[in-house]
Image (cartoon, rainbow, N blue to C red):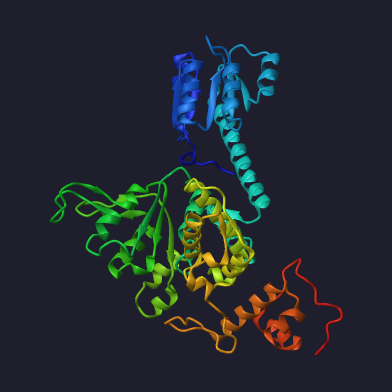
Amino acid sequence: MRVEPMDVMPILIVDDDASQRRLIEFWLQEEGYTALTASDGHEGLKFFEQKSPVLVIADLRMPGLDGLDLLSRVKAINQDVPVILITAFGTVNNAVEAMKLGAADYLLKPLNADELKLVIRRALEHQQLLDENRYLRNLADTGFRFENLVGRSRKMREVFDLALQVAQHDTIILLTGESGTGKELLAKAVHQNSLRRGKPFVTINCSAIPEALIESELFGHRKGSFTGAIADRVGKFEAANEGTVFLDEVSELRPSLQAKLLRVLQEREIDKIGYPHPIKVNVRILAATNRDLRNLVEDNQFREDLFYRLSVVTINLPPLRQRKEDIPLLVEHFIRKYCDRHNLPQVSLGDEALEILTGYNWPGNVRELENVIEHLVVLAKDRVIRAEHLPAEIRQAKVRIGNLALELPADGISLEEVEKEILLQALEKHNWNQTHAAKYLDITRKTLIYRMEKHGLTPPAGAAKVSPDAADE
């Protein structure tokens, strides 16, 4: 594992010897780190509280607050921050005491540059591993949470697993899914779990910026480069340098800007309006769309080369109707969120109301559910949400067997995929019990098994077995 300098916050050097501080600072800058320096323990503690450095290097013997006292104070504030102690008066007792108090290492003066750099790198690598392990343990404990995204369904677990796997690599990711499924939340979660966390996260809504202004908005311009350019402007790509750019609704970019975006991805540079030379940028690209880019490529509305550059890794966020087992968790999450936000007592939800919410198809997905829950939380008079409090369009929505109401997409639909999805939902509803799922679908178990094999549907580990007394129809 390698810890990149861009990922670390400042390293704090605390030593009453000015020449020693300057020497360590020089060594750190050689490695690409940012250094803060303090001339005594009290100043060092003040900087630690204000600047939150990622690592502390402190002299053992200093007037006032010495290295061991500073180590204790630092660990009391944040026990995870590595502290390296240095001294010209090394004794076994001092070393033992330092390690007992939680020092990451203990070095003797005169310092060796290579040794110090190695110790720093090891301490930061160890800290990064601890952070990753802590995150994974938290994810395992909750079982259904990734940043602000909530879900325990198989589909969402697959999304979380893939997002976590690719987050720490600078791979370009294309997020697909219907409006309201949480693509921007997932993009932010990927950024927060990447090596670029702590750096800018800049969102660009490609459909919301007027066409006449979008090039200036993305890449910036120089004063006087066109009518109305009364001052220099820093574009969003330049503002996001060393961070992440999230291109929302990337399918709406006009062709000329698609070509410019392709150049940014390939050359890592932008053409700022009015500047004679390209400007280098170091950004990670995450893009999102609620449209099928492959269809747009076939219709010559989206560049094929740009599509392949953007879809190095594709993560699809399923619509809420395909993960209804997540609805109770989402409802609970949003109730807590909006009770806290509006400083209201907690609200309880009646069983009938939850049943109706779970049965509704949510065409607006998670965003629609969140808006409904906020409305209910604010207006709940006796702090109980009952069925009669739900919006009329949700209470009156019924599934009509034999005349099933479907909202067909304008660009066509695959009957095979519809059948596969219906089978999958019926099986998941009955924990993969084939007998019960077949009865629910009003087909024989043999027909169900045939169609499962046709679509490659296999039960996940831990799913219910077929009842031993099930008849072989």
Vertical position of residue 301 compared to residue 141: above or below: below
The picture quadrant where one finds residue 255 is bottom left
Q: Determine whether, in the image, residue 91 is placed left or right of residue 301.
A: right
Q: In the image, what residue occupies the spot 45% across and 22% down? A: 37
- Residue furthest to the right in view is 469
Q: Nearer the viewer, residue 84 or 205?
A: 205
User: Which residue of the protein is positioned furthest toward the top in this rendering?
Assistant: 63
How far across and how far down the image is residue 205, in percent? 35, 60
Can residue 194 be seen at all in this image of the molecule? no
Q: Residue furthest front?
A: 382
Q: Residue at x 73, y 74 (%)?
A: 432
The quadrant of the image that shows the C terminus is bottom right
Seen at 83% across and 77% down, the residue is 467
Between 373 and 56, the one lying in front of the other is 373
Q: Visible in this render: residue 385?
A: yes
What is the number of callouts on the image?
0
In the image, residue 89 lies at what x, y percent? 61, 11
The x, y position of residue 340, in whole percent, is: 51, 47
Q: Nearer the viewer, residue 348 or 368?
A: 348
Quadrant of the rendering where the N terminus is positioned: top right
Whether residue 270 sits left or right of residue 171 in the image: it is left
> Which x, y percent locates residue 396?
52, 76
**Residue 432 vertical position relative to residue 127 in the rendered view, above or below:** below
